[in-house]
Amino acid sequence: MSYDDILDVASREQTEVIQKMGGSEALEEPYTQISLRKMVQKRAGWLVILFLGEMLTATAMGFFEGEIEKAVVLALFVPLIISTGGNAGSQATSLIIRALSLGEVTVGIWWRVMRREILAGLALGVILGTVGFIRIAVWQAAHFKDYGPHWLLIGLTVGLSLIGIVLWGSLAGSMLPLILRRLGFDPATSSAPFVATLVDVTGLIIYFSVAFALLHGTLL
Amino acid sequence: MSYDDILDVASREQTEVIQKMGGSEALEEPYTQISLRKMVQKRAGWLVILFLGEMLTATAMGFFEGEIEKAVVLALFVPLIISTGGNAGSQATSLIIRALSLGEVTVGIWWRVMRREILAGLALGVILGTVGFIRIAVWQAAHFKDYGPHWLLIGLTVGLSLIGIVLWGSLAGSMLPLILRRLGFDPATSSAPFVATLVDVTGLIIYFSVAFALLHGTLL
């Protein structure tokens, strides 16, 4: 094998890893040459699977329809909350997939990874939760938006939920590739979007549970 | 350079690409050896930037608070709608980043990429929109959930929004890496999560605009 051959193999593998991480089957043909029909087929599969998973968010939201009806303000932060959990999860997943493929991390040290991610997730959650709380407090104080007499409780709900969701996202995001590897699957197989879906659904449950605990008797 | 050296360089570059795509600075040290403090610093930066971007979703949702109050049922599909747009966008971004780095795509043929993504995005949107509409129709017919007398209009709102959002996500997701490259930035720099944030905000606007157009006079 020449240098070029080696780089070629390395590059082909990298293409597959990146395409899979982005949530699509490997195209197997250059982007500009593959037929439109084939490309849609390759891309539709994962999007539909993720869509079916994400449908659970509609079911989860349905459970909390009563809460949203009583406190519409809660709905305003749903996209922020779930996307932040998803971002934290994707980040952890990417780091672990890479560490796995470099051999820095193995399934055997999952508890060490878990301990690290609990601490890192907690720290990241506190940072983002604080920013979220400040956002609500500043908007309220500057009259950009009136969250009503219970704005402080709403701010706490969002801040505390973010801590829980970022922690949970980091943990789930780091463990999923290890679980996939342990089960004999390729950890790169669409892990990041899959984690985002998982974290979206559980994030909603965390958010509305925190809301119920803090706002019961006032808004709820 | 030996074979090993070459693979080493290729591997180091791949690590950076993957970590950046996952939305974190390159760690520069093995996962198991980097200090917790350093890792949190490296990860917090991007998460905070994305969080600040995602805050726009709270602002966007605030604009539609009146609509949500009148039709709480609309809130139920918000996570499904925005995450699907984000998934479509991330997928397109990953494909284009890779095609760029392989030289299959260049900034010069952006209009060819755009045409492909409009067609592919439309096809993918019609597939997902149809699945979304069927989900609502089946849940209604099977009495899993009662979306009320206007369930058909709600189903059409979700279905048509999905077409628009998947199309827009594919388009924005494919163009962003080209724009970043044109401006002299590294297209891999957190493109996928950045696209998701962009698509989340615009997705909400598309969804509530379609809802207003279809439900004005009935639910809204």
Image: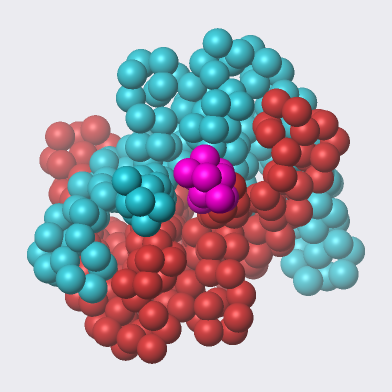
Chain colours: A red, B cyan
One can see residue B92 in this view: yes
Residue A102 in picture, x, y percent from top left: 38, 66
Residue B40 is drawn in which quadrant?
bottom left
Residue B60 is drawn in which quadrant?
top left
Kindly give the residue lying farthest to the right in the view shown: B141
How many dots with numbers?
Answer: 0
Residue A4 lies in magenta, yes or no?
A: yes
A155 displayed left or right of B90: left
Residue B203 in picture, x, y percent from top left: 55, 36
Magenta span: predominant SS is helix
A199 displayed left or right of B43: right
Magenta-highlighted residues = A1-10
Residue B169 lies in magenta, yes or no?
A: no
In the image, B214 versus A21, the foreground residue is: A21
User: Residue sitting at 35 percent across and 37 percent down?
Assistant: B189
User: Residue sitting at 20 percent across and 75 percent down?
Assistant: A119
Name above or below for residue B5 compared with residue A215: above
In the image, B156 versus A95, the foreground residue is: A95
User: Residue sitting at 26 percent across and 67 percent down?
Assistant: B31
In the image, A7 versus A115, the foreground residue is: A7
Residue A220 in picture, x, y percent from top left: 39, 68
One can see residue A57 in this view: no
Name above or below for residue B124 compared with residue A192: above
Name above or below for residue A21 compared with residue B186: below
Residue A153 in picture, x, y percent from top left: 23, 63
B196 displayed left or right of A151: right
User: Residue sitting at 12 percent across and 68 percent down?
Assistant: B35
Name above or below for residue B205 compared with residue B127: above
